[in-house]
Image (cartoon, rainbow, N blue to C red):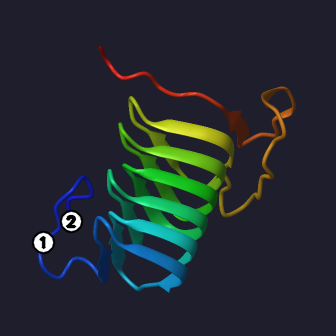
Amino acid sequence: MNFRGKASSGDLSGFLDVGSHFEGELEFEQSFRVDGKVVGKVVSEGDLVVGESGEIDGEIRVGRLFVSGLVKGEIHATRRLSIHPRGRVEGVVHARALVIEEGGILEGRSSMKSESAEATPAESSATSAPGSSKVVGRIPAKP
């Protein structure tokens, strides 16, 4: 699957298209793409893709999360969170790996944990515990 936009047949467990709205708890097995709006809870061991027009407001618990749209709330990514150039994440992030591409925005708190040690989110960068950070701002896009 190309997480920047195109999926081949059979790659997705489901899809929420532009102009669609879902409210409640969404569960899927392999991968799901959101180009509409989701309010509520998203749960999966698989991959969640939030397209440029996609928006999620709520709690997310997935294996990998790829954000090109807007995500607000508490995020638990057991493997990886990737914020693409037009992506924006606002809230509390718990992820084993965090990638913010140039132009991507993370506003909130983040914590990274390994299997052997669990870190707690820091309240400020001055009091950060190892593996934790507070991030407010953006990585500017090239002119």
Q: Residue at x 72, y 36 (%)?
A: 134
- Would residue 56 be found to the left or right of residue 54 on screen? right
Could you say which quadrant of the image residue 104 lies in? top left
Residue drawn where x is 84% and y is 39% of the image: 123
Q: Residues within 10 Å of mark 2 (few under 14, many from 20)?
A: few
Spot occupied by residue 84 in the image (x, y as percentages of width and height): 37, 43
Residue at point 36% right, 23% down? 141
Q: Amino acid at mark 2?
A: Met
Q: Residue furthest top?
A: 143
Q: Secondary structure at mark 2?
A: loop
Is the C terminus in the top left, top right, bottom left or bottom right quadrant? Answer: top left
The residue that label 2 is drawn on is 1
Q: Amino acid at mark 1?
A: Ser
Tell me where residue 89 appears, x and y as whole percent: 54, 47
Figure check: 85 above or below 73: above
Q: Earlier in the sequence, mark 2 or mark 1?
A: 2
Instruction: Please tell me how crowded label 1 is: few (under 14), some (14-19), or many (20+) other residues with Cα within 10 Å.
Output: few
In the rendering, which numbered label is found on residue 8?
1
The answer to whether the residues at label 2 and label 1 have Cβ atoms under 8 Å apart is yes
